[in-house]
């Protein structure tokens, strides 16, 4: 893991087209601004994990349905 120190309004660059900027500091929270191409999904990690779990469940449901159809 790369650990960087940044101050308010400073940023880091990821590749050519992703920028993460410190846009606010309030108490123990830091607000980040992320600029990325529209085709790149940006989520909080807990939301990303929830999406992955839902996608896995949907795939399992489809596989179960296919299995039932093959048995007929």
Image (spheres, rainbow, N blue to C red):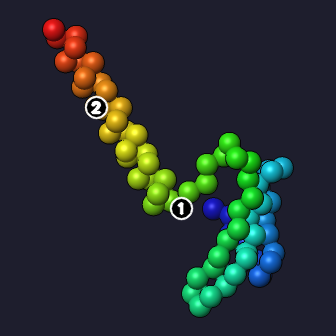
Check the picture and name the quadrant holding the N terminus: bottom right
* Residue 10 located left or right of residue 32: right
In the rendering, at what x and y percent does residue 30 appear? 63, 79
Q: Is there CB contact under 8 Å for labels 2 and 1?
A: no
> In the image, what residue occupies the spot 73% across and 64% down?
20
Spatial CA span between label 2 and label 1: 26 Å
Q: Residues within 10 Å of mark 1 (few under 14, many from 20)?
A: few
Check the picture and name the quadrant holding the C terminus: top left
Q: Secondary structure at mark 1?
A: loop
In the rendering, at what x and y percent does residue 8 appear? 77, 82
Direction left: furthest residue: 72
Q: Can you tell which quarter of the image residue 71 is in?
A: top left
**From the viewer's perspective, is residue 10 above or below residue 43?**
below
Q: Residues within 10 Å of mark 2 (few under 14, many from 20)?
A: few
Q: Nearest the camera: 62 or 7?
A: 62
* Residue 30 located left or right of residue 19: left
Q: Circle 1 is placed at which residue position?
A: 44
Q: Report the number of discs.
A: 2
**From the viewer's perspective, is residue 4 above or below residue 43?**
below
**From the viewer's perspective, is residue 1 above or below residue 26?**
above
Q: Nearest the camera: 22 or 69?
A: 69
> In the image, what residue occupies the spot 41% across and 53% down?
50
Q: Can you tell which quarter of the image residue 2 is in?
A: bottom right
In the rendering, at what x and y percent does residue 6 appear? 76, 77
Q: Can you tell which quarter of the image residue 33 is in?
A: bottom right
Q: Circle 2 is placed at which residue position?
A: 61
């Amino acid at each position: 893991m790369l650990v960087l120190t940044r101050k308010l309004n400073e940023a880091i660059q990821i590749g050519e087209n992703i920028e993460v900027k410190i846009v606010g500091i309030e108490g123990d929270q830091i607000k980040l601004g992320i600029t990325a191409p529209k085709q790149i999904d940006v989520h909080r990690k807990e939301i990303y994990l929830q999406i992955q779990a839902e996608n896995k469940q949907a795939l399992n449901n489809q596989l179960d349905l296919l299995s039932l159809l093959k048995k007929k």
